[in-house]
């Protein structure tokens, strides 16, 4: 090939490659043109342009059919791979644009497994096999909000407190809470009953979690209900609260879903009236990524 006929492969468009593959598959210009939604003359001009760019004869006419030449067969094998890869790229891009693919980071404090978060993730992933969720474990709702502001996550699951003016949120259900005590605990000479009014709960020593966790929010609720709870252990990691209660250190208020069902050393006691607090899936205002939008819409549906 002379210097005058050197060509840049990048000049060959994916459309031309796709058109050549269609001609090879259909066998005739008219059938390929019909499949591509073109006129036979327009497709013929496109093939001529392709052969001019490559300085190759891709097809020869055999009767009423177009058959690839030897070099055409080699070129078409490569073209098919390119077209397949481009179809995959288009599919991935379409999935990403539609929130069906991609990765999202959600900040969730301890205890999120007992919240609506698993149900939300299941709903968002349903029918979206290429979507990935990364849960950023933070120690409190305050850290979750800080992570959201810093851009380390797109969404944050937090108690539904006053929403900061620079953020927005979607209600996503409630945390139901319960009192847990050692199974054989006798307080002030009597066995603790199976239900307990909130105003009486100040009589117990408590194991409290880190600031911003469900147990500290519950302690604040007790104080507003007129109880005077006394924490004998503070800043306890969620994983250690049940063990401290089982050892007799004190009572604790935790989410109902976090109470182990097979631990004979712990007893769960219903609270009267019930104690819970709402949750918010918080996000930054403005336009959301397609994946984040999927989660926010799923949250609205779950709460609805």
Image: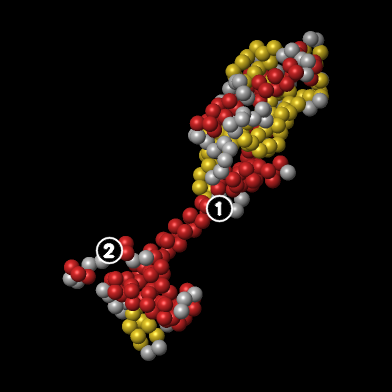
Q: Nearer the viewer, residue 256 or 48?
A: 48
Image point 81% across, 13% down: which residue? 190
In the image, which disc is placed on residue 50? none
The quarter of the picture where the N terminus appears is bottom left
Image point 61% across, 30% down: which residue? 165
Q: Residue furthest left?
A: 2
Give the SS element for disc 1.
loop
Residue 108 shows up from this direction: no
Q: Nearer the viewer, residue 165 or 218?
A: 165
Q: Which residue is mark 1?
A: 98
Residue 158, picture quadrant:
top right
Q: Which residue is mark 2?
A: 8
Residue 151 shows up from this direction: yes
Image point 45% across, 62% down: which residue? 87
Q: Is residue 293 left or right of residue 28?
A: right
Q: Residue furthest top?
A: 188
State which mark lies toward you, 2 or 1: 2
């Amino acid at each position: 090939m002379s210097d005058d006929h050197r060509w840049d492969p990048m000049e060959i468009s994916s459309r031309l490659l796709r058109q050549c593959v269609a001609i090879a598959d259909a066998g005739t210009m008219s059938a390929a043109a019909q499949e591509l939604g073109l006129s036979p003359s327009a497709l013929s001009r496109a093939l001529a342009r392709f052969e001019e760019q490559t300085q190759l004869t891709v097809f020869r006419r055999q009767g009423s059919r177009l058959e690839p030449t030897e070099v055409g067969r080699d070129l078409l094998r490569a073209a098919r791979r390119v077209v397949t890869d481009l179809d995959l790229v288009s599919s991935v891009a379409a999935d990403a644009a539609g929130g069906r693919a991609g990765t999202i980071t959600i900040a969730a404090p301890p205890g999120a497994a007992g919240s609506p978060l698993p149900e939300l993730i299941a709903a968002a992933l349903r029918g979206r096999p290429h979507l990935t969720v990364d849960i950023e474990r933070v120690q409190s709702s305050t850290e979750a909000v800080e992570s959201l502001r810093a851009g380390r996550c797109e969404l944050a699951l937090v108690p539904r407190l006053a929403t900061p003016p620079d953020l927005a949120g979607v209600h996503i259900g409630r945390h139901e809470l319960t009192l847990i005590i050692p199974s054989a605990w006798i307080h002030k000479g009597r066995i603790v009953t199976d239900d307990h009014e909130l105003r009486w709960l100040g009589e117990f020593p408590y194991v409290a979690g880190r600031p911003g966790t469900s147990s500290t929010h519950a302690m604040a609720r007790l104080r507003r209900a007129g109880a005077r709870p006394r924490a004998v252990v503070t800043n306890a990691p969620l994983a250690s609260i049940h063990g401290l209660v089982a050892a007799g250190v004190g009572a604790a208020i935790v989410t109902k879903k976090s109470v182990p069902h097979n631990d004979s050393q712990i007893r769960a006691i219903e609270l009267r009236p019930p104690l819970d607090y709402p949750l918010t899936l918080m996000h930054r205002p403005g336009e959301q990524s397609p994946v984040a939008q999927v989660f926010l819409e799923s949250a609205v549906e779950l709460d609805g």
